[in-house]
Image (spheres, rainbow, N blue to C red):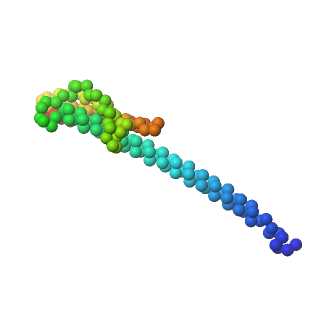
């Protein structure tokens, strides 16, 4: 039997094996990319929720310390802020405030909770800050 007859059909199993390995490798890469994409989406949504909470806290500071110098208030019930700016559309902030007097100093505690919903995913971040009155 010649060497040519013994090798007949040997490349077909190798070609099928290589195709199967490449298909499995491609499937794994697509799966990893989808996982990374979901992670990035969650991180972006979380960042938007953080900035929503920060916007709510800034709003409360503006109510406590008005720019025109008039006396502010921490006791007013703050409305839920529905944010519509370009980066925060679909997000809102719930703000609460309390104050404590120690001696002649008034200390304000502001709690702001930002939440964002997008395409079935949601993120919530809470921010608490303290400020001392003048």
Outermost residue on the right side: it is 1
Picture mark count: 0
Q: Is residue 99 left or right of residue 10?
A: left
Looking at the rendering, in which quadrant would you find the C terminus? top left
Q: Residue furthest bottom?
A: 2
Q: Is residue 73 left or right of residue 42?
A: left
Q: Position of residue 86 (x, y in %)?
A: 33, 43
Residue at horizontal 22 percent and vertical 25 percent from the top = 75
Q: Position of residue 15 (x, y in %)?
A: 71, 62
- At x 29% / y 31%, what residue is drawn? 95
The residue sitting at 49% across, 49% down in the picture is 36
Q: Indicate whether 49 appears above or below 73.
A: below
Q: Is residue 56 visible?
A: yes
Q: Is residue 126 visible?
A: no
> Hey, which quadrant is residue 87 in on the image?
top left
Image height check: is 2 above or below 45? below
x, y (%) of residue 84? Answer: 32, 38
**In the image, residue 122 lies at what x, y percent?**
43, 36
Indicate whether 33 appears above or below 68: below
Q: Decide which of 55, 97 is in the foreground and name it.
A: 55
Quadrant of the image containing the N terminus: bottom right
19 with respect to 64 (left or right): right
- Residue at 56% across, 51% down: 30
């Amino acid at each position: 039997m010649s060497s040519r007859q013994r090798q007949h059909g040997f490349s077909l199993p190798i070609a099928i094996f290589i195709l199967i390995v490449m298909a499995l490798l491609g499937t794994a890469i697509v799966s990893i990319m989808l996982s990374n994409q979901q992670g990035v989406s969650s991180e972006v949504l979380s960042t938007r929720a953080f900035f929503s909470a920060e916007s709510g806290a800034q709003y409360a500071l503006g109510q406590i310390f008005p720019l025109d110098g008039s006396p502010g208030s921490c006791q007013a019930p703050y409305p839920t802020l529905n944010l519509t700016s370009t980066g925060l559309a679909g997000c809102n902030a719930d703000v609460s405030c309390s104050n404590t007097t120690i001696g002649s100093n008034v200390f304000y505690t502001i709690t702001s909770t930002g939440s964002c919903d997008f395409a079935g995913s949601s993120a919530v971040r809470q921010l608490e800050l303290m400020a001392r009155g003048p």
